[in-house]
Image: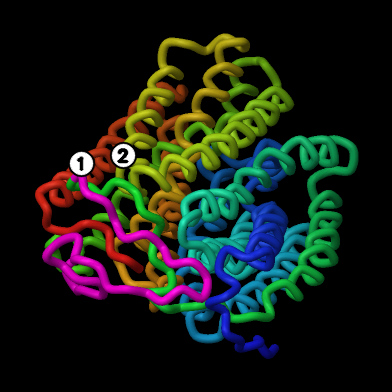
Amino acid sequence: MTAVVADTGSLIESRYAWLRLAASLAFMTLSSCGMYAIVVVLPAVQSEFAVDRAGASLPYTLTMIGFGIGGVVMGRVSDRFGVRVPLAIGSVTLGLGFVAAAHAPGLLSLSIIQGVLIGFLGTAGGFSPLIADASLWFNRRRGIAVAICASGNYLAGTVWPPIVQALAESWGWRSTYIGLGVFCLVTTLPLLAMFRIRAPLSDAGSAPAARPGPGGGSEQAAPRAGEAVRPGPAAGPVQPGSARPFGMPANLVMVLLCGAGVACCVAMSMPQVHIVAYCGDLGYGSAAGAQMLSLMLGFGIVSRLISGWVADRIGGLRTLLAGAVLQAVALSLYLPFDGLGALYVIAILFGLFQGGIVPSYALVVREYFPAAGSATRIALVINSTLLGMALGGWLSGSIFDLTGSYDAAFVNGIVWNLFTVLVAVVLLRRSRLGRQAPIAA
């Protein structure tokens, strides 16, 4: 599969860039189906294989672990060969994975198929490589572009749960999986034609739009297509491409960001993974839980778009901090309220509050690190959030099995969330002290 190498500088923020972004949104919506389908069929899987709640959560857990590890691998593949290669791999393996999972004879085989074919290869191929690709095609509107692309993951969570729920009730979960596999394969393959051109990688040509910097000044504005790039005054003592973002070793910053990603998504996974089962336990039925999941992720799309707009003005780091604080607030609301109406309202609030967190990590990486190798770095950080989802999904199920209630699981999520807040505060404080403003990268 050969990518077209062209002078892409003039295509930044062009009509082609927006069409490519639309294709990215569509592809991610389709490729993210696997991580939500297994959540909806979790009660059916638990019943068929006669396992406890933690055991039934294993396919989802391995899907997210595979998703996280695979994202890093696919990020490296994208950096080396272009985004089209991981997309092609993901398209084929996702379709095959659904069909293979439908024929799984037991829970372990189902979990392995979910983890390898659907998570590691299928869904991972169409997630972080697309987010990194979107960040390279936009300068002044990078925040909203990344948010639109990342919204595909939540759009999938809005569209697929009610569809999978309805099909599973009529056909059974195995026949539903076969249908999903065929549909995803025939719809994702044609989209590959939109990604034949390799993305631009020039740091100078991908400078973020001018906005207030962390120290109160302004960052360098992005040049228009064809306009010469003029070096401006350094925003801080650390220059573009430095090994010390925030005045710290780059690897340490990556560890902190990855740790924050794990922590915030341990918290995020509690309602996203277990809301269907939670509603069933409360006597409201699985269908109500699937509706709440769709509402949660649907309003998460709104949150991601708003957060992208906000990030273009205040930066990714401040947006990350705001999202983490608001997520903790929303999660705490599950403790005193468990009425049906209240749960619908909380699902909406949770979606509105936490949707912008994950895309903010990509923006922080692009603002404080150079463009070269961005797909790998973004994959490392964003896919740490997927590992957090995997850990949180299993951990919440285990806490439920131990206590017979989800209350302790909600508290557990809030505690993990505080670590994300702490990391964001520390990095923001170091940025405000003038150790580094975002680079023109």
Q: What residue is shown at x 37% (from left), y 74% (from top)?
A: 229
Q: Position of residue 66 (x, y in %)?
A: 52, 63
Q: Position of residue 419 (x, y in %)?
A: 25, 41
State if disc 2 and disc 1 touch (CB < 8 Å). Answer: yes
335 versus 15 height, above or below: above
Secondary structure under tag 1 reads: helix
Q: Is residue 234 magenta?
A: yes
Q: Which residue is mark 1?
A: 425
Under mark 1, the amino acid is Val
Task: Give the mark count.
Answer: 2
In the foreground, 349 or 334: 349
Locate the C terminus and report the quarter of the image it occupies.
bottom left
- Residue beneath the point at 76% across and 75% down: 193
When asked about the image quadrant of residue 334, the answer is top left
- Along the line of sight, the residue nearer the viewer: 107 or 140: 140
Give the residue furthest to the right.
Answer: 170
Q: CA distance from mark 1 to mark 2?
A: 7 Å
Q: Which residue lies at the image location 55% right of the left edge and 63% below the top edge?
A: 134
| Residue interval drawn in magenta | 216-244
- Up the image or down, 140 lies above or below 100; here it is above
Which circle's residue, 1 or 2, is located before the other in the chain?
A: 2
Q: Which residue is mark 2?
A: 321
Say the numbered circle drawn on residue 416.
Answer: none
The x, y position of residue 161, in whole percent, is 72, 39
Dominant SS in magenta = loop
Q: Is residue 275 magenta?
A: no
Residue 301: in sight, yes or no? Answer: yes
Q: Would residue 26 appear left or right of 74 to someone viewing this image? A: right
Image quadrant in which you'd find residue 187: bottom right
Residue 109 appears in the picture as rendered: no
